Image (tube, grey):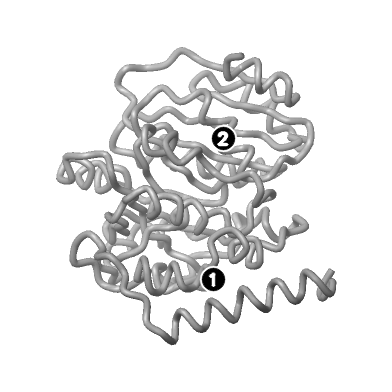
Amino acid sequence: MNDLMVLAEMGISTRKTQSSKENVFSILIPTWNNLQYLKQCIKSLRKYSSFDHQIIVHVNEGKDGTIEWLDSQDDIDYTFSEKNLGVCYALNAARTLVDTNYILYMNDDMFVCPGWDKALWEEVEQIRHNRFFISATAIEPDAQSNCSIEADFGRTIQTFRESELLSSYQALDKADWNGATWPPNLVHKDIWDMVGGYSVEFSPGLYSDPDFSMKLWQSGIRLFKGVGRSRVYHFGSISTKRVKINPGYYQFIAKWGITSSTLTNYFLKRGTAYTGPLEELTVSPWLKFKNCFKRIQLLFNSYFGVGS
């Protein structure tokens, strides 16, 4: 059974446009009734990208006119589900339409700055192999982590100050950093396929990002790099504020035996200055004890139904 037949069995339809051999990345954008932000995102991709890219949108529900708008565009591929399947299924569905060697996952509430893709492509050319995971750097009104730049150019489309962002983004201080995890992130399609894409047990998607990074780590990837000069503006999880989230923290511990913060802080050293591929981790007795305690706590809570 081919990919399209599998999607059809799941109730997912597709629309494929004529692909271009000039496309560099295949950009996967999950969206859920968020048309105005999606339009803004795609406008920025068309206007401020240095190269041509394949754009693939997965539409969850699309009750706000998203499908109708996409049908009027002749350069966007999409997959569509009448129900909200969440991020993991959305990304895996969009993967079936990928034409290039490089898969880039982007949120629909992001706005790319000029040269964002050129900076990532220059990294790819310098690496000279496909065993990497690299990320652009987000500018956010409230920085969600030490990987982001905190700078407020508007919290909504209505208050977005585009011209001010474009005149200022290059002057914001941020060097390359360790620990690519969150979008926008870039991976070779062979590596994506090797680890099986995004894990649907984390649907609708909370903690699916560190889970993907952990799968890469387990497969031997050690080059996790955030590119400081590749910049996008992120309005800030517009869709996730509306969805009933999964218990990702506990799912991650149950799957991997460690907390996600152990992965990001100790394995990936996320947000620290980039100096090269990461080294193998020597786990301290304290860290082993902490994660052992968390696993016991999880088993206790599961057995006695605490928090259920």
Numbered mark located on residue 195 in the image: none
x 63%, y 67%: residue: 249
Question: In the figure, residue 235 lies in which quadrant?
Answer: bottom right
x 62%, y 45%: residue: 87
In-image side of 201 versus 23 (left or right): right
> In terms of sequence position, does the residue under pointer 2 or pointer 1 come before the other?
2
Report x, y in % for residue 46: 42, 35
Report x, y in % for residue 250: 66, 67
Q: Quadrant of the C terminus?
A: bottom right
- Closer to us: 194 or 177: 194
Residue 280 appears in the picture as rendered = yes
Dot 1: element: loop
Question: In the figure, residue 172 lies in which quadrant?
Answer: bottom left
Circle nearer the viewer, 2 or 1: 1
Q: Is residue 63 above or below residue 239?
A: above
Q: Is residue 174 above or below residue 285?
A: above
Mark 2 Cα within 10 Å, few/some/many (few <14, many 20+)?
A: many
Dot 2: element: helix
Contact, mark 2 vs mark 1 (Cβ under 8 Å): no
x 57%, y 61%: residue: 236
Q: Residue furthest bottom?
A: 286
Q: Is residue 215 above or below residue 150?
A: above
- Closer to us: 234 or 98: 98
Q: CA distance from mark 2 to mark 1?
A: 25 Å
Q: Quadrant of the N terminus?
A: top right
Report x, y in % for residue 262: 46, 73
Residue tagged 1: 259
Amino acid on which disc 1 is placed = Thr
Amino acid on which disc 2 is placed = Asn
Residue 162 appears in the picture as rendered = no
Residue tagged 2: 92
